[in-house]
Amino acid sequence: MLFICYKGVLNLSYNRVSEANKEVYLFQSSQTYQKVIGKEVKEHPLLEEGRLPDDVVACAGDGSNAMGAFYEFLNDENVKLFVIEAADKWIDTKQHVATMTLGKLGIIHGMMTKVLLDENNDISKVYSISAGLDYQGVGPEHAYLEEIKRVEYYAITDEETVLAFDYLSKPEGIIPAIESAHAVSYAMKSAKTMNKDQILVINLSGRGDKDVRQIVEYRGLHLEG
Ligand SMILES: Cc1ncc(COP(=O)(O)O)c(C=O)c1O
């Protein structure tokens, strides 16, 4: 199967940048910016532990923070790469934005990739607790990486996400973006199956100060101000 991005960009985040600036060259520069994180993720365990991580986990809406974290590891086959997307209320209401898990081959924003389509093969209406994951497509590089089985894709519900948000915020004092909390939730489950000496990296794509009100409202409470 062929996954194509007609503008020569790998995902929507790059696409937004190049559209705004009308410069195809920005594709290369934004790819360079995303890779900076992956370089650090590779260097730190090598320096501190003398080896690469076992697993790298990232959330995906369009897919750019995950690609940034993964890029340096694509040829390191012993490093397992996981993308976590939003199953949201799928179990109760079928509302979700799990494009890789439940999507089909389609075209969206000039890309041939996995897309969430409705029964008429139109682009679906989607729901997500996290604004940043709320996108019916995904960068075509992910569709390709899934097909060649280099990256595994899983989805996490709202409830699991909110529990992970609390888990990292309270004891650690690190408030993850609600998008990133999807990855934290998956990592909390998978860490239980790992040995203590294994290294699992979670790419925190953003900070969650912006999401505190939403978490409070999810719990049925109200924040003044
Ligand atoms: C904090 C945060 N994480 C993740 C995402 C998802 O985007 P991507 O999958 O392109 O990294 C967004 C998008 O707005 C975001 O704001």
Image (cartoon, rainbow, N blue to C red):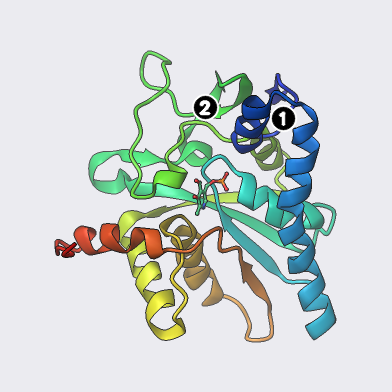
- Are the residues tagged 2 and 1 within 8 Å (C-beta)? no
Q: Quadrant of residue 79?
A: bottom right
Q: Evaluate whether residue 116 shows in this view.
A: yes
Closer to viewer: mark 2 or mark 1:
1
- Check disc 2 and report the residue beneath it: 104
Instruction: Give x and y (percent) for residue 48.
Output: 79, 84
Q: Quadrant of the N terminus?
A: top right
Q: Residues within 10 Å of mark 2 (few under 14, many from 20)?
A: some
- Checking the image for residue 29, the label placed there is none
Q: Quadrant of the C terminus?
A: bottom left
Instruction: Give x and y (percent) for residue 145.
Output: 70, 41
The residue positioned 46% from the left and 66% from the top of the image is 176
Q: Evaluate whether residue 1 shows in this view.
A: no
Q: Quadrant of residue 216?
A: bottom left
The residue positioned 68% from the left and 79% from the top of the image is 198
119 to 168, vertically: above or below: above
95 to 43, vertically: above or below: above
55 to 128, vertically: above or below: below
The residue positioned 19% from the left and 63% from the top of the image is 219
Residue type beneath disc 2: Lys
**Foreground pick, 101 / 159:** 159
**Foreground pick, 197 / 159:** 159
Instruction: Please state the total of marks drawn on the protein image.
Output: 2
- Check disc 1 and report the residue beneath it: 9
Q: Residues within 10 Å of mark 1 (few under 14, many from 20)?
A: many
What is the distance, in whole Å, between disc 2 and disc 1 at their CAs? 20 Å
